[in-house]
């Protein structure tokens, strides 16, 4: 009962923190981390020690799954080269750089242990990257690259972490062992992910009940992760592969009602889990400090060194890799948009916030090393925690200002509207042709009404190309129809209160009106 009470308290605080962030125009992850830091020292406030398994198996899979579901596979594939350069190349580069610097400053600590910490702090956080990038309105391609990086970099870091830990505790690690670890972890993850997509896609296709689709969708990430863990494959890779594959096929797998409900449920789950994650990170401060007995000057110096390497390594890797691709004719065309001008790699470089995976991996560091080698585990956990807080609060809070300062050109709204209008015109033509084939099966007034509806959708798409400063006919329609819906709702409510209609009639009427209002808001761009 006590554990349930703590969960409710944490969710309540996370919700209030997110609401406060929106009210103040701040980023929710930053507000919640700071709130957690403050509340961690409040006497009597519930406390929970974050276990690595809880994060890697309980929290991360659903967050990665919903992010993969919403990722455009064509856009992901088109940007695969820069995504892999960040998710694989940059993670390895950062981990080695941190490991070398830390080993130079702590020569008594084996390099394998230092490399393990490098793997811990190397990957930017999937949740933070998505939340911050979308919130501040970065260009679509930058968001795609950051999201793609955050989907894959955890797998790279965790594989390297396993190898480094094995070496640190005295296991023989050679080329054969590393190759086997990569093949089993990454290859097995891809295999399990593809199998999960086939199996659950098959099941989704044969379900017609939205509630069952919702339940299955919530089960999928955990089923995939548990299966991958059974064969020691990467659960992260498996979940991402399943999410990408199912998300790409979702329009053909789920009914319209199921898609609406699944989307709404996952928005709520993501909102609660993201808030919970960042709050819990802040609440870990007392535990992190508890076993830290190093001299303050040494702690400050090492913290500054690791932070500097983590931040600088991203730019040191990003700029050369971005611009060197332009020297290769085969790669030039695909990379030109990001490589030019320099403001794009600059903003991507500053978007390197670390998060809960870093802390979970740090807490999974071994208690002792081989042959009793000196090993300041508590110091390493502190360094990981400091990297999370400084990058998330520091870089996350300043990223909007950096983006504004760099004046990144926004996506071309006119071109988007023009493309949408062109496709809508083709879709309307297909709809009219299909209606003409079936016109004899329905009364003529019904057919005429459907023809007008098709024309209205086509006109609405072209209206978006008009001036944003004047109200379009569709916007005027939406405004007036909203007032009419409100009036209809009030009549039904009064009728229910006076006993003229039962509650069931009110519920059905409100449901129809709510659906229409939701459609009005979507068409109005809200």
Image: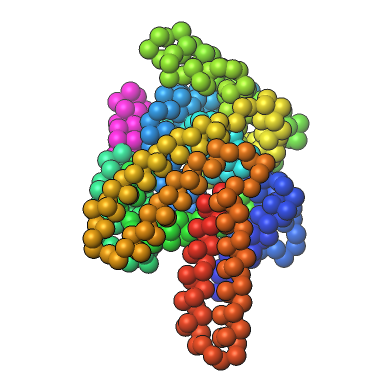
Q: Nearer the viewer, residue 498 or 3?
A: 498
Q: Quadrant of the N terminus?
A: bottom right
In terms of image quadrants, where is residue 410? top right
> Residue 104 appears at what percent x and percent y?
60, 20
Q: Is residue 496 magenta?
A: no
Q: Residue at x 47, y 82 (%)?
A: 505
Q: Residue at x 66, y 38 (%)?
A: 396
> Residue 80 appears at what percent x and percent y?
40, 28
Q: Is residue 222 left or right of residue 90?
A: left
Residue 180 seen from this side: yes
> Residue 366 appears at what percent x and percent y?
49, 41
> Residue 159 appears at what percent x and percent y?
41, 34
Q: Is residue 228 left or right of residue 414?
A: left
Q: Residue at x 33, y 23 (%)?
A: 175
Q: Residue at x 62, y 38 (%)?
A: 467
Q: Main secondary structure of the magenta part?
A: helix
From which residue to which does the magenta span run?
A: 171-188
Q: Nearer the viewer, residue 477 or 275?
A: 477
Q: Is residue 174 magenta?
A: yes
């Amino acid at each position: 009962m006590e554990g349930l009470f703590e969960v409710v308290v944490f969710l309540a605080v996370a919700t209030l923190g997110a609401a406060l962030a929106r009210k103040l125009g701040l980023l929710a992850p930053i507000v919640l981390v700071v709130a957690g830091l403050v509340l961690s020292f409040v006497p009597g406030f519930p406390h929970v020690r974050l276990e690595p398994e809880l994060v890697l198996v309980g929290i991360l899979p659903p967050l990665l799954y919903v992010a993969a579901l919403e990722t455009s596979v064509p856009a992901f594939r088109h940007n695969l080269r820069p995504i892999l350069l960040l998710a694989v190349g940059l993670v390895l580069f950062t981990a080695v750089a941190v490991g070398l610097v830390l080993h130079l400053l702590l020569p008594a600590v084996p390099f394998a242990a230092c490399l393990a910490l490098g793997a811990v702090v190397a990957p930017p956080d999937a949740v933070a990257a998505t939340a911050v990038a979308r919130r501040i309105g970065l260009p679509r391609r930058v968001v795609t690259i950051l999201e793609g990086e955050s989907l894959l970099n955890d797998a790279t870091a965790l594989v390297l972490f396993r190898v480094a830990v094995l070496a640190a505790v005295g296991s023989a690690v050679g080329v054969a062992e590393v190759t086997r670890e990569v093949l089993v972890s990454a290859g097995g993850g891809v295999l399990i992910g593809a199998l999960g997509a086939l199996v659950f896609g098959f099941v989704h296709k044969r379900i017609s009940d939205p509630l069952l689709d919702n339940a299955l969708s919530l089960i999928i990430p955990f089923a995939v992760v548990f299966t991958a863990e059974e064969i020691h494959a990467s659960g992260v890779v498996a979940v991402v592969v399943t999410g990408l594959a199912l998300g790409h096929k979702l329009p053909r797998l789920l009914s319209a009602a199921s898609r609406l409900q699944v989307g709404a449920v996952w928005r709520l789950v993501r909102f609660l889990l993201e808030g919970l994650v960042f709050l819990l990170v802040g609440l870990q401060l007392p535990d992190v400090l508890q076993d830290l007995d190093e001299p303050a000057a040494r702690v400050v110096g090492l913290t500054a060194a690791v932070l500097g390497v983590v931040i600088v390594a991203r730019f040191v890797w990003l700029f050369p890799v971005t611009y060197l691709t332009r020297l290769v004719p085969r790669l030039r065309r695909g990379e030109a948009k990001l490589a030019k001008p320099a403001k794009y790699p600059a903003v991507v470089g500053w978007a390197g916030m670390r998060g809960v995976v870093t802390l979970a991996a740090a807490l999974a560091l071994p208690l002792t090393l081989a042959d009793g080698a000196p090993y300041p585990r508590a110091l390493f956990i502190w360094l990981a925690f400091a990297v999370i807080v400084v990058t998330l609060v520091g870089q996350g809070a300043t990223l909007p200002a950096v983006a504004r300062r760099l004046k990144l050109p926004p996506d071309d709204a006119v071109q988007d509207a023009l493309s949408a209008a062109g496709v809508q015109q083709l879709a309307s033509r297909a709809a009219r042709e299909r209606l003409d084939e079936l016109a004899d099966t329905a009364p003529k007034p019904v057919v005429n009404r459907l023809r007008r509806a098709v024309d209205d959708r086509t006109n609405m798409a072209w209206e978006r190309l008009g001036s944003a400063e004047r109200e379009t006919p569709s916007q005027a329609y939406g405004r007036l129809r909203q007032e009419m819906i409100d009036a209809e709702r009030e009549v039904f409510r009064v009728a229910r209160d006076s006993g003229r209609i039962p509650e069931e009639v009110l519920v059905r009427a409100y449901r129809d009106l709510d659906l229409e209002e939701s459609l009005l808001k979507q068409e109005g761009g809200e």
